Image (cartoon, rainbow, N blue to C red):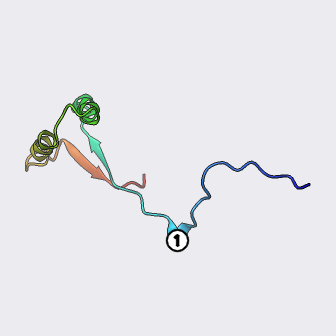
Amino acid sequence: MSKKKNKRGRKALPPDKKKPPQPTIKINEALLPFVKLLKAEFKAKRVSDDTLNRLTECLLEPGSEHLIKEHSGDH
């Protein structure tokens, strides 16, 4: 009788098959509570796609660079 090892989860991908890390966005601390609430409301389907897109456009307008900084996923 052979003993079976308990294996859980997926087998790790070889390094050449791994995807590069996705970029993350660092949000100004003053906006973070609003963004968290907005995300929760969007997941609960209480915010429409159109509203979310308009808010995103406002944040990405020229002059709002101090609100959002883009970082690569590798820290």
Q: Residue furthest bottom?
A: 16
Residue bearing the label numbered 1 = 16
State which quadrant residue 29 falls in: top left
Q: Nearer the viewer, residue 25 or 14?
A: 14
The image position of residue 69, as x and y in percent, is 24, 48
Q: Residue furthest front?
A: 1
Q: Residue drawn 41% across and 58% down?
A: 21
Is residue 19 depicted above or below 27 in this figure?
Answer: below
Residue nearest the observer in this picture, 45 or 37 = 45
* Left or right position of 62 against 29: left
Q: Is residue 66 above or below residue 32?
A: below
Query: On the rendered structure, is 12 left or right of 40?
Result: right
The one of 51 and 66 positioned closer to us in this rendering: 51
Residue ID at (33%, 54%): 23
Q: Secondary structure at mark 1?
A: helix
Name which residue type carries label 1: Asp
* Quadrant including the N terminus: bottom right
Residue 43 falls in image quadrant = top left
Q: In the displayed image of the protein, which residue is found farthest to the right? A: 1
Residue 8 falls left or right of residue 62: right
Q: Residues within 10 Å of mark 1 (few under 14, many from 20)?
A: few
**Residue 28 location in percent, x, y?**
24, 37
Q: Position of residue 75 (x, y in %)?
A: 42, 51
Count of numbered tags: 1
